[in-house]
Amino acid sequence: MHTILANKAGFCSGVKRAVDMARDCFTDDRKWYTLGPLVHNQAVIDYLHAYGIDSVDSLGDIKDIPAGIIIRSHGVTPSVISDADTLGLIVKDATCPLVKQVHEIVASLSEKYDIVVFGDRDHPEVQALIGWCDEQAIVVNDPDQICDLQISAKMAVVSQTTKDEKKFERVVDALKSKCPELRVFNTICPATRLRQKAARDLCSQVDVMLVIGDSKSSNTATLYKECLDTGVNTYQIQSSGDIDIKWFRDAAKVGITAGASTPDWIIKEVVERMTEMENNQAETGKQAEAENVVQDPVQENIEGQQEESFAKMEAEMADFATPSKGDILTGRVIQVLDDEVMVDVGGKSEGIIPQREMSLKDIDSCKDLVKVGDEIEVLVLKWDDDGTILLSKKKVDSQKVLDSLEEYYKEGKTIDGTVTDSVKGGLLVDVGIVAFLPASHVEDGYARNLEEYIGRVLNFKIIEFNRNKRRGSQVVLSRKDLVAEEKNKLKKSFWENIEEGQTRTGKIKRLVDYGAFIDLGGYEGLLHVSEMDHRRIDHPSDIMNEGDEVEVYILGLDREKERVSLSRKKLLKSPWQNFVEKYNEGDVIEGTVVRTAPFGAFVELDPGVDGLVHISQLANRRIEKPEDVVSINEKVMVKILSIDPDEKRVGLSIRALIEDQEKEEVEEYLDQQEGE
């Protein structure tokens, strides 16, 4: 016979918290009581009594005030807390944190919704829960009871934390079919679900199942029923003294589980009793084998297996040890909410990771990072005031990142990071943790605008590392030497490959009155203002901006002085080329009078292209001077009489337009006469 202990059994974190709070009172001089049994387990009650902590059914039973009262893990109604204050009792509230959450849910919903509680009406948890919704809750223990309920328009349903989840789902389904607006809160404790699943899984591997727990324990009763429903022979016991050897007559494997209110020492006693029975069975088998002188190869290792059995059970029990502050554990995610994650960290322990401890970066929801079933490493921060094990994933991640960064620092390696923000004196960089980049180390020279680096992924060298630093950044970065080194490489490559007459694309680094300095990828060249365009440019900023990319022509090189002259004008079509491609003789276009002379007026047709309207072409009459007809900056319509690309001359006429208009008017008049 071989015995297997379920991987989830015994005290849950809420019960352990309550017992630990009671233990804290052992050395207190005042008398302490628990309001009702602290947990539904007589062995625990007897244990507390031995240390002077007794159970009372009501506050009125306490005679030796001042005294202390411990609220049990099942919780109490708000009025009980108020009455305890009135009586002058010191109150220690050991209500399970998950039960408290259910109290908050029903209290917040009871004004707008009729509350339905799935649970046992006489159970202290349910009785307390009813008190948090003004004694107005409807309690059901079976889906069939829904048929007899008076259904309202708006209802909310919660569950006693130790009930069967499948049965709760059937209750919900029954309510959904009747209630127009139903809000559902599955408040069954994750520890309860885990124990039930572990028990069901174990049932599939064994011939007999033992469920350890007090006869008054609701979660033990649920666990017992779960095992029975699998079809395996199941027995509920309160201690090792309840075990009957006849149960295992034909059993090869026996499974053991325990309710959430069952203390470790009782589980251990049962394990020891079963191990003793295994050893006795093995010894009996050996004697029978000797008497019959039969050698069975399968049984050759029985003795060694039985000797190892108790050691294995001890190891499994050791898994139930409470994690200590600073421990790093591997856990499995069992619940994910927006603002927290519940993690099973082995044995009977479940912990909570608040959103702030999930990631080194700011996140909107924990659901963005993990899902149920994921295995993650966490660090134990502490047992919180409400009994929850407080965990951090962020601190484990931070330690791993710091380990990696320390290695980079010691070996002088570079690392990529993303600039996230600018602060006084420099920039913040995400390298797994937040590092600091001083302004003097952003470039190999002065960085004028730190804001332009935000969002960029750059390469850095770690120049300071101190993981124990409490103020300021643990990691200080620099780009200064890296930028200088890269620039030297690019500069060398630039001068090896640059030639006059090449066309290059560069970025405008800065503008000055006389031109623009263009970064050509390793070296800067000067684009003089006179080489920017065919037309006159008053200031470079009139046509370009710092940061723009521009195509330039390598106009001249001075390798000794390392100077590069550039031209943009060389790559642009001349104004005359553009004009000839757009216009023909006879076209009528608009222009601007830019200057006058005794022999006529010059009209700008396109930037860089002027045409002449001879004085004889300014009007259809004789005039003394051009100013009699036109003025500087006046917009005029002109007709192109001639285009000479070689001489870059355009002949224009205003008179031709007037004559054309008069001719059209005459023809229109004659057409009208013929029509009459």
Image (spheres, rainbow, N blue to C red):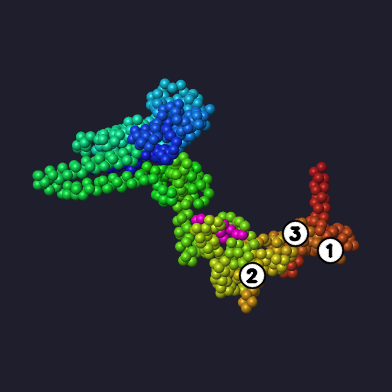
Asked whether, in this view, residue 240 is left or right of residue 378, the answer is: left
Of the pair 389 and 581, the residue shown nearer to us:
389
Residue lying furthest left: 292
Q: Which residues are magenta?
A: 425-437
User: Disc number at residue 586?
Assistant: 3
The spot of residue 396 in percent (x, y) is 45, 52
Of the pair 498 and 122, the residue shown nearer to us:
122
Q: Residue at x 48, y 48 (%)?
A: 358
Amino acid type for the residue under numbered disc 3: Gly
Does residue 436 show up magenta in the picture? Answer: yes
Residue count near mark 1 (Cα–Cα under 10 Å), binned few <14, some 14–19, many ≥20: some
In terms of sequence position, does the residue under pointer 1 or pointer 3 come before the other? 3
In terms of sequence position, does the residue under pointer 1 or pointer 2 come before the other? 2
Q: CA distance from mark 3 to mark 2?
A: 45 Å
The spot of residue 360 in percent (x, y) is 50, 52
Amino acid type for the residue under numbered disc 1: Thr
In terms of sequence position, does the residue under pointer 3 or pointer 2 come before the other? 2
Question: Which quadrant is the N terminus positioned in?
Answer: top left
Closer to us: mark 3 or mark 2?
2
Does residue 228 show up magenta in the picture? Answer: no
Q: CA distance from mark 1 to mark 3?
A: 23 Å
Instruction: Reply above or below: 174 against 397.
Output: above
The spot of residue 348 in percent (x, y) is 37, 42
Asked whether, in this view, residue 424 is left or right of residue 126, the answer is: right
Q: CA distance from mark 1 to mark 2?
A: 41 Å
Residue tagged by mark 1? 596
Of the pair 372 and 45, the residue shown nearer to us:
45
In this rendering, does residue 74 appear at all? no
